[in-house]
Amino acid sequence: TLPEYLYSDSKLILEEIQAHRYSDWHSPFYRWFWGLWTRILPGPEGITVFNIGWLWLACLAITLLLRRKLGWKAGLFLLVPILPGQLNLTGTVVIDTTMNVFFLAAVVCSLLAAGATRERLKLRYVVASTLCLTATVLIRSNSLFAILPLLAVNTGLIIPPACPSTGPLAPSNRNRL
């Protein structure tokens, strides 16, 4: 498909933004977010620039964050934007592309949290990831099922595991049970 191609749903959302007439047929958050971009670049251009730019930035960030662990294989994340399915959606104005971008941003924030050495910084990254996941669901409600594993990871990053040497089942506490 051609860059900035508008599907019928996207045409309807853009018409609502331009006419300042809103319905709840589509995500109010997505319409509001796209409306912010029309102030910078009117029409579909603003959201298209956001989607393409942040898709590439997120994939680059994932590559850089995983390069020590995965070596050259981390570079494969740079292929995501040019995979046929994603390439087909990236230039078009469709709600799924923006949802994917927010999800990838959440992954980046979670990876940053996992590598953070200070607890306060880790918490900030987890909060940023959770906000991106919230935006993902606000854009498309059925993405709730896709975000659950990352929410579990985020929870594990901020809630320390029970320590077997000090917990209720620790050898020193077993006599009390």
Image: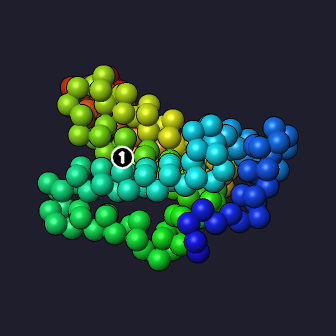
Identity of the residue drawn at 60% across and 62% down: 4
Quickly name the residue at label 1. Answer: 108
- Left or right of 122? Residue 152 is right
Colour logic: rainbow
- Left or right of 16? Residue 80 is left
Identity of the residue drawn at 14% across and 54% down: 68
Identity of the residue drawn at 38% across and 56% down: 56
**Residue 47 location (% of width, % of height):** 57, 50
**Residue 22 location (% of width, % of height):** 83, 41
Identity of the residue drawn at 16% across and 66% down: 72
Q: Quadrant of residue 77?
A: bottom left
Q: Quadrant of residue 169?
A: top left
> How many circles with numbers are drawn on the protein?
1
Determine the residue located farthest toward the bottom in the rendered image: 84
Q: Nearer the viewer, residue 33 or 160?
A: 33
**Residue 164 location (% of width, % of height):** 25, 35
The correct choice, above or below, for 120 with respect to 125 in the image is above
Rate crowding at label 1 as few (under 14), some (14 to 19) or many (20 or more) other CA atoms within 10 Å.
many
The correct choice, above or below, for 130 with respect to 7 in the image is above
Question: Visible in this render: residue 120?
Answer: yes
Quadrant location, the N terminus: bottom right
Q: What amino acid type should be assigned to the residue bearing mark 1?
A: Val
- Left or right of 125? Residue 148 is right
- Secondary structure category for the residue under label 1: helix
Q: Nearer the viewer, residue 170 or 175?
A: 170
Quadrant location, the C terminus: top left
Q: Nearer the viewer, residue 86 or 120?
A: 86
**Residue 161 location (% of width, % of height):** 31, 35
Question: Visible in this render: residue 170?
Answer: no
